[in-house]
Image (tube, rainbow, N blue to C red):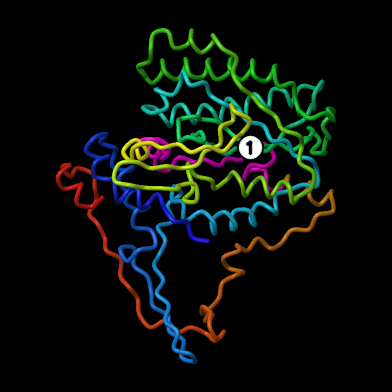
Amino acid sequence: MRPRYEVAAVIRTFGKDYINTHHPNAYQLRTLRAIRNCRTEAMGGHVDHCSACGQIIISYNSCRNRHCPKCQGVQREDWIKARTEDLLPVAYYHVVFTLPDTLNQLCLYQPVLVYGLLFKAAWETISMFAIDPKYLGAMPGMVAVLHTWGQNLSLHPHLHCLVPAGGVSVTNKWVNSKNKAKYLFPVKAMSIVFRAKYTAMLKRTCKKQHVRIEPDLFEKLYQNNWVVYTKLPFKGVNSVLEYLGRYTHRIAICNHRIINIDDTYVSFYYKDYRDENKQKILTITGIEFLRRFTQHILPKGFVRVRHYGFLSSTQKPLLRRLQKNFGILFSSGKKSSELDKKPYEICPVCGNKMIRTKIIRPKRGPPLEGLPWSQILKYV
């Protein structure tokens, strides 16, 4: 079922006012323009005709931007199918590493630095506990997915990590986790180690790169406990795939959560975790909505899904040997897009093949870098 309102409609309604007020960078502007034009005539498309019943279908192209609410479904399915070849028949833990809001201001101005260190500190924390013989005594694996938002579109950087309940020994043998409880490693201890590692990395990097920070930032970072959360282990491959599909290609807000747009305000559903997960409605101005949405547009080229340990790309031969030891056979490695490719679309009315009769060329806008704001406003 198609949503009644879309993020694209918010951009069309409030985009120019937002740009005049907050002056986003060129990459954010291109992203907003792509979302606004997704699956419209501006992106181009094609016309298909059924010679049997005369049905005509006009299809417009997707922008395929990773921040677009319309473009994540197919990408998510392809990614999940590719990841099924990397799964092992073991339990998986869901571990969440969260940064304190003390770092929110730095996130806005140094996102690559802050988010990159989040990945690094989380992996080093997992690795430190995993190599300890008291807990595992083996090399772990991890798939980490970065989310930067809360339910109300506020800045809330956190890392969702999928960690197998075991690891690989120095002799390349599988070692099962020694802890059968609801957590892989002690959460409170992980929180202390994570805070120490991240703070030390941040201090070194800021000094090396001459990043200007608040004088008392590091003192504030140690005033509160940092949050590391672990869920019960998944049981079965289907549960793991459900997790992957839920988190890997999620964006800040989906179109179905938007319930109203008027001349001034945007209303959307959100879940209040502080009030027993109750679903509530938040109404904010359209300019504020776009400000919150834009702060979750990651820098160009920043990788938000990363693999570590024996699940990394460099350890594929080791992973295949482990799968062989578990009795798992994997496919030839063809992408799902190759396997599912169809020469023609099928007519939804009579079931015959559709014939492509026309190509609609996209309307290309100019590069936005270096243009004055008066010109940029014409293309957003």
Determine the residue positioned at 51% across, 33% down.
150
Determine the residue positioned at 44% across, 12% down.
217
**In this picture, is 330 found above or below 30?**
below
**In this picture, is 245 found above or below 206?**
below
Q: Residues within 10 Å of mark 1 (few under 14, many from 20)?
A: some
Instruction: Answer whether residue 53 is magenta in the image.
Output: no
**Residue 124: percent from the left, percent from the top?**
63, 25
Numbered disc 1: secondary structure: strand
Q: Which residues, given as a range, are shown in magenta?
A: 291-317
Task: Answer left or right for 79 relative to 18.
Answer: right
Tell me the quarter of the picture where residue 118 sits. Answer: top right
Which of the two residues, 368 or 34, is positioned nearer the viewer here?
34
**Residue 23: percent from the left, percent from the top?**
25, 36
Pointer 1 residue? 308
**Residue 229: percent from the left, percent from the top?**
66, 27
**In this picture, is 242 found above or below 104?**
below
Task: Answer left or right for 363 relative to 9.
Answer: left
Tell me the quarter of the picture where residue 225 sits. Answer: top right
Tell me the quarter of the picture where residue 308 sits. Answer: top right
Q: Which amino acid does label 1 sit on?
A: Tyr
Which of the two residues, 39 or 84, is positioned nearer the viewer here?
39
**Residue 196: percent from the left, percent from the top?**
58, 15
